[in-house]
Image: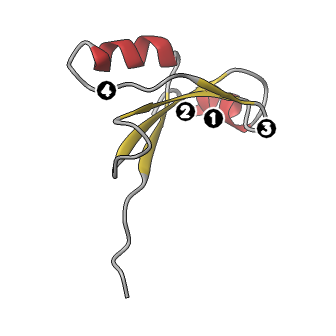
């Protein structure tokens, strides 16, 4: 049996552009932003999808569960 592997950890942020730029300025590799219509999010991987334990930044760009979560709890 193989051990479980951590794919990524996601954070809901106000702006993926601002968050990604802050991390890029500290030398972290930042991927291209992608829109996920079904989720209503704009997403950027930090560390790349090919890396184990990547960081996924998610921004709510339309009404839905993520925008409600941001309104209720804020970024995190």
Separation (CA) of disc 1 from disc 3: 16 Å
Residue at (37, 65) in percent of width and height: 5
Separation (CA) of disc 1 from disc 4: 27 Å
Secondary structure beneath disc 1?
helix
Residue 3: x and y in percent read 33, 77
Separation (CA) of disc 4 from disc 3: 26 Å
- Asked if the residue at tag 3 contacts the one at tag 4, i.e. Cβ–Cβ closer than 8 Å, the answer is no
Residue 28: x and y in percent read 26, 26
Numbered badge on residue 38: 3
Secondary structure beneath disc 3?
loop
Counting residues from the start of the chain, the first of labels 1 and 3 encountered is 3
Secondary structure beneath disc 2?
helix
Separation (CA) of disc 3 from disc 2: 22 Å
Numbered badge on residue 29: 4
Residue at (47, 41) in percent of width and height: 10
Task: For marks 1 and 4, give the one nearer the viewer.
Answer: 4
- Asked if the residue at tag 1 contacts the one at tag 2, i.e. Cβ–Cβ closer than 8 Å, the answer is yes
Residue indicated by mark 2? 73
- Asked if the residue at tag 2 contacts the one at tag 4, i.e. Cβ–Cβ closer than 8 Å, the answer is no
Q: Nearer the viewer, residue 72 or 25?
A: 25
Counting residues from the start of the chain, the first of labels 1 and 4 encountered is 4
Q: Nearer the viewer, residue 32 or 55?
A: 32
Numbered badge on residue 69: 1
Numbered badge on residue 58: none
């Amino acid at each position: 049996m193989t051990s479980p592997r951590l794919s990524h950890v996601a954070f809901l942020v106000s702006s993926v552009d601002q968050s990604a730029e802050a991390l890029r300025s500290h030398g972290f590799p930042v991927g291209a932003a992608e829109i996920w219509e079904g989720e209503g999010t704009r997403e950027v991987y930090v560390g790349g999808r090919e890396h184990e334990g990547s960081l996924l930044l998610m921004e709510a760009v339309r009404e839905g569960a993520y925008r409600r979560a941001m309104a209720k709890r804020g970024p995190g």
